[in-house]
Amino acid sequence: MLFSETEIALIASAKRKVQMAQKVWLAVIALVVLGTGLTISGLWVNEFAIYMAFGLVVFAVALPQFGQGPKYEELVSLLEKKSQG
């Protein structure tokens, strides 16, 4: 498949966005593990922690759709267009 300059720029932007999302995912995992460890050890007793953990997971799952860069639908559209001819 040959891509135009704008399509290559779209792909590069998506790659940067995925790399940023992966870094945030690692941070979210670290926060959830740290919070779980503190809660189990009894150092952090807070009912709000459950809601925060759930919010972090939802944020991490939705992260690729936030911020600058192409959305998932744009990339799928580009690939469909290229695969059809």
Image (cartoon, rainbow, N blue to C red):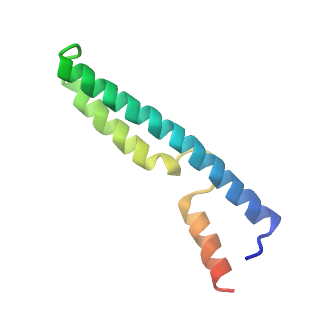
Image quadrant for the N terminus?
Answer: bottom right
Relative depth, front residue between 16 and 65? 16
Whether residue 69 is visible to the viewer of this picture, yes or no, is no
**Most extreme residue toward the top, as rendered?**
43
Image quadrant for the C terminus?
Answer: bottom right
Give the answer, above or below, for where 24 lies relative to 65: above
* Residue 3, x across and y down, in percent: 77, 70
Give the answer, above or below, for where 67 lies relative to 37: below
**Most extreme residue toward the bottom, as rendered?**
85
Relative depth, front residue between 15 and 75? 15
**Most extreme residue toward the right, as rendered?**
5
In the rendered image, which quarter is residue 38 located in? top left
* Residue 18, x across and y down, in percent: 57, 49
45 sits to left or right of 32: left
Q: How many marks?
A: 0
Measuring 37% from the left and 28% from the top, which residue is drawn there? 31
Give the answer, above or below, for where 59 lies relative to 77: above
Whether residue 68 is visible to the viewer of this picture, yes or no, is yes
46 sits to left or right of 57: left
* Residue 29, x across and y down, in percent: 38, 35
Give the answer, above or below, for where 18 lies relative to 82: above
In the rendered image, which quarter is residue 82 located in? bottom right
5 sits to left or right of 40: right
Measuring 57% from the left and 57% from the top, which residue is drawn there? 71
Measuring 30% from the left and 31% from the top, which residue is drawn there? 52
* Residue 7, x across and y down, in percent: 74, 65
77 sits to left or right of 11: left
